[in-house]
Image: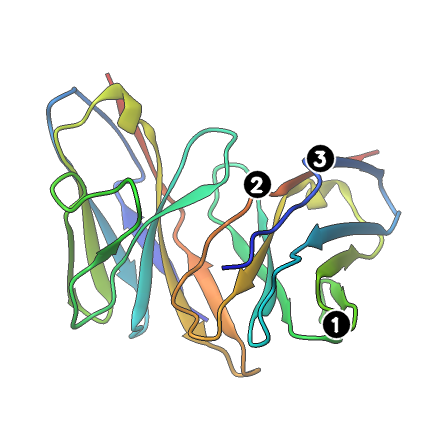
Amino acid sequence: SAVISQKPSRDICQRGTSLTIQCQVDSQVTMMFWYRQQPGQSLTLIATANQGSEATYESGFVIDKFPISRPNLTFSTLTVSNMSPEDSSIYLCSVVVLSSRGYYEQYFGPGTRLTVT
Amino acid sequence: LAKTTQPISMDSYEGQEVNITCSHNNIATNDYITWYQQFPSQGPRFIIQGYKTKVTNEVASLFIPADRKSSTLSLPRVSLSDTAVYYCLVLGADFNKFYFGSGTKLNVKP
């Protein structure tokens, strides 16, 4: 298993500013993902952030808007740049580990609730 | 990637067995099926994963027919605390992409 913490848990930011969200994992993991979840909606994958390579962004998400760092196997950051109210959402960090049962299991952090005013 | 289709919502009563079915008609040979549970204000939590036939753990059972074009998550004797959104995902063999569908909102009533 993997235990994930995120900072901050929530924040209220002004438009035009940037926020960096931190994700810390209690074990070394290769595969890490960042998701966004609007209220009442499903999760949307923003990017894959595997250590040792540049982040891979999904359609509709670009590095200039959502720069990601992955300096080691236990930590990653996602920055939401030049924020607008449309960026108000919950941002979740996720990792995938190979379980003792032979499955690839995905674990999520508690999320960061961002409100842009 | 195999797209998944689930009912938007379901209602049940405490003590009942709940079956949530997910359709994934274009699942590939090496794809796995995984189910997650999400409570409000929390990240999704892994429930169960399977490839074919039946998988059972301490939380749920997963039934997958021979053609693997659908799967059914079975929750035995649900309680109020099982009220949550349940997501079905189909994972490629490389396990590098994890896309969520719309999910099923289960409402358990007393």
**x and y percentages locating residue B60 in the rendered image:** 74, 62
Q: Secondary structure at mark 2?
A: loop
Mark 2 surroundings: few (<14), some (14-19) or many (≥20) residues within 10 A: some
**x and y percentages locating residue B23 in the rendered image:** 69, 53
Q: Which mark is residue B102?
A: 2
> Which residue is more in the foreground, B3 or B47?
B3
Amino acid carrying mark 3 in the image? Ser
Q: Which residue is mark 3?
A: B9
At horizontal 82% and vertical 49% (from top left) the residue drawn is: B18
Q: Which residue is mark 1?
A: B56
Amino acid carrying mark 2 in the image? Ser
Q: Which mark is residue B65?
A: none
| Quadrant of res A44 | top left
Contact? badges 3 and 1 (CB < 8 Å) = no
Q: Is residue A50 above or below residue B101?
A: below
Q: Does residue B103 appear left or right of residue B62 in this picture?
A: left
Disc 3/disc 2 C-alpha distance (Å): 10 Å
